[in-house]
Amino acid sequence: MYNNSIVSSILLAYEEGKATRDPRTRHWLLLDDNPLHVWIITALYIAFATIGPKVMQNRKPFNLQTFMVVYNFGLVFMSLYMMIEIIASAYDIGYFNEDPWCCTYNQNTPKNPKELRIAKVFWWYFFSKLLEFMDTVLMVLRKKNDQITFLHVYHHSSMFNIWWWVTTYLPGGQSWFSSSLNCSVHVVMYLYYALAAIPSMRSKLWWKKYITKYQLVQFVLILYHTLQTTYTGCDYPMWGQYLLTGYMISMLVLFGNFYLNAYIKRRRVGLAKKSEDSTNGVINNGVHKTNGHSNGHSNGRTGVVSR
């Protein structure tokens, strides 16, 4: 009897959820009445990220340089388009005429072309999260297993699922801020990846650590934006605000830990090593060595997360 009551409650919540979903996106690609197919895709993605490196263990890495250049530049232009379109749509709807910190989501105007415009670009943003799974595929095929971290897999899989919920239930309102800001980050990030895939450009990419800083600033701004509207009673579903708040906190913790280990601690180790080598008179062809590299550049990870 107790189990039947639980099942009944779940089914009731499911039916109520279907009734509150946005009618504009109901029949769009991958936006059916339940997220089962999204969960299946996510499970396959996680399985590939886990099993793929083992399958590639005794195989030679693929040379995918040309594909990587095309793929990454493609995401640069896609992210730039989405950023511009989201901001233009938000302006067209009138979000900036009201309180930009509190943009009301209006589900009761399904035929309003302005509301439909932002819903469409939100779908493209959601779909881009599926395309970005290719980041991990490239890592596996190129045997860059040290880059397939928990942070990487968690970020990619969670964004795909979160934006299924947003595009299904809340394709408008407050979400314009986080999505447009994230697109701006991805313009810079994928531009870096595209240029890094070109051998002649790699030595000129001095700004990689600033991408991670930009990502951290992004999370702080989104968290502030979300908390501010939570406390001011903005007319936007609270479950969406709580979901984003929790997710931003997790991102700040994980990305902050990455930055600490990739830059702060590594820099301290490098300075200590340099001091030790200088004290011991370690010289390589007339050039003091730092961390074993006579050119002063580390050959470790790129130091850019989410790739």
Image (cartoon, rainbow, N blue to C red):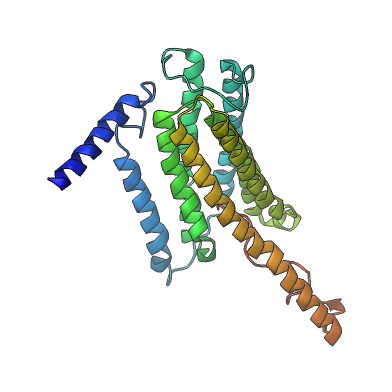
Quarter of the rendering containing residue 187: top right
Residue 108 image offset from top left, x and y in percent: 41, 15
Quadrant placement of the N terminus? top left
Q: Residue furthest right?
A: 286
Residue 105 image offset from top left, x and y in percent: 49, 23
Picture layout, residue 242 above or below residue 202: above
Q: Is residue 120 left or right of residue 38?
A: right
Residue 227 image offset from top left, x and y in percent: 57, 37
Residue shown at 45% from the left, 37% from the top: 163
Depth order, front residue of 45/25: 25
Residue 141 image offset from top left, x and y in percent: 47, 60
Q: Is residue 222 left or right of residue 109?
A: right
Residue shown at 46% from the left, 19% from the top: 106
Residue shown at 53% from the left, 55% from the top: 64
Residue 138 seen by the camera: no
Picture layout, residue 133 above or below residue 171: below
